[in-house]
Image: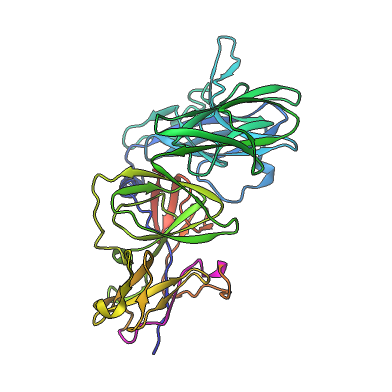
Amino acid sequence: MKKTFTFSGLRYILMTAVLMLVSSADMMAGDAWYAYYNKLVAYPTGAGTVYADEYGYDAVDETLYANESELQCKQSYSPGGYYAYAKPADGWILAGFSAATFDEAGQPIFNDAVIETSNPAYLTIYSEISTEEGADSSSIDYPLDPNNVHYALFTHVAPRYAAGQDSLGTLSISKVCNEIGDNVTLTATPRDERCHFDRWTLDGETVSTEASFSVDVTKAAEYVAHFTCDSAVIINFPEDGGYIYWYDDVNDISVPDNVTTLDVWSDYVYLNNGETVDSLNFSEGSYYASACNATILYGKGEATLVKTPSSYPYASEYSLLRWSGDNGVAVADLDATSTSYYTFDTSNATFNLAKSGETIAAQTTYLAVPDSLYKNGGDAPSIIYTSYADKAAGINSVKTDSKVATGIYTLGGIRQKEMNRNGIYIFDGKKVLYRRK
């Protein structure tokens, strides 16, 4: 009888997750906790609206957006943080989020320096009070520090990094919150001597090759800075998405937001009653790939992979992915008595069983599944589906195993594909704290 495997979930349980589980238990037991207050303000008034949320729900009620959003909460860990949502008005865009202070007259002074451009953004709460064990939360005298404010800065022209290039240099603009009719100067500065500025683009078209150039503000526009770097590789994925195989025996690589790593780890195989395999875990959404470990990358559009010499280059014993090398590898030369091997079909996003007479193509990533991981023994399945299969031609749905109670959810119960922002999640029924590296 053939069996179907489904890769699901992701390998995002970090060391901080352990701390979160411990601190959650402590909080329920009446131990110390921390109180926080913050306020999020839209600037300039009328250019957009904001909403501050402790947990980060995917869908925000439109009626909750306002010019200001106050947040007061109690958390069991420090430092705290919250999700900042911004909705630009027509004709405006979000420059980013900024911290702020107040002058002696009580007027806000935001530092005009963008600290986060993602939307929603995860921002750290700086004002806090800590309590002793057993303290009553009703004793909190909000707003604690009323001068603790973040601003959502709305504008018309803003500089942006090409995907994955935020570590290759810095960007600035002469007036962050600019108006129609202004003239602003955008400047890109390479990080070091290994990095070089290449060009500015607008809507995919090159508009300047000068690192610093001026433009008249006539409409909302995002100018994208492109760098090159000796320690980076620029890959042009298809705009509608595509795959490449990846392996480097010397360098770790960072992965930008428009690229996903696809990995399989034997130590995250889900077991039913601790005995039989219900599904293998296909990790989707990492932010790096380690040296000596083969992977598959899925990306959309131009992406930059930044290389860093690995301090500990070694192949993980838990990875089920292998690299075929420069000459490929014959299945007959592999240990087929206890392991089944699969090649990846980039058109359908599936792993297909390789027959004994096949040769796995050179410089590709293939899958090695030990027979010991098969559910209830028996023959190896001819196809192993990934959750990306529904994005590929010829596959209409993802096969799942209903016996496995797995998944990632917000605290509000909304299912997530991955932990893509800092915050608290429910992973397989347990609270975890995820912080992006």
The correct choice, above or below, for 220 with respect to 374 in the image is above
Asked if residue 424 lies left or right of residue 45, the reply is left
- Residue 145 pos. (x, y %): 49, 23
Count of numbered marks: 0
Nearer the observer, 59 or 318? 318
Magenta highlight on residue 381: yes
Nearer the observer, 346 or 124? 346
Which corner quadrant of the image does residue 382 belong to?
bottom left
> What residue is shown at x 57% (from left), y 57% (from top)?
238
Nearer the observer, 427 or 331? 331
- Residue 232 pos. (x, y %): 42, 43
The correct choice, above or below, for 342 with respect to 363 in the image is below
* Main SS, magenta residues: loop
Residue at the extreme bottom of the image, as rendered: 1
- Residue 253 pos. (x, y %): 37, 48
> What residue is shown at x 24% (from left), y 62% (from top)?
317
Can residue 272 be spotted in the picture?
Answer: no
> What residue is shown at x 41% (from left), y 53% (from top)?
286
Q: Quadrant of the C terminus?
A: top left
> What residue is shown at x 72% (from left), y 27% (from top)?
217
Part of the protein shown in magenta: 377-391
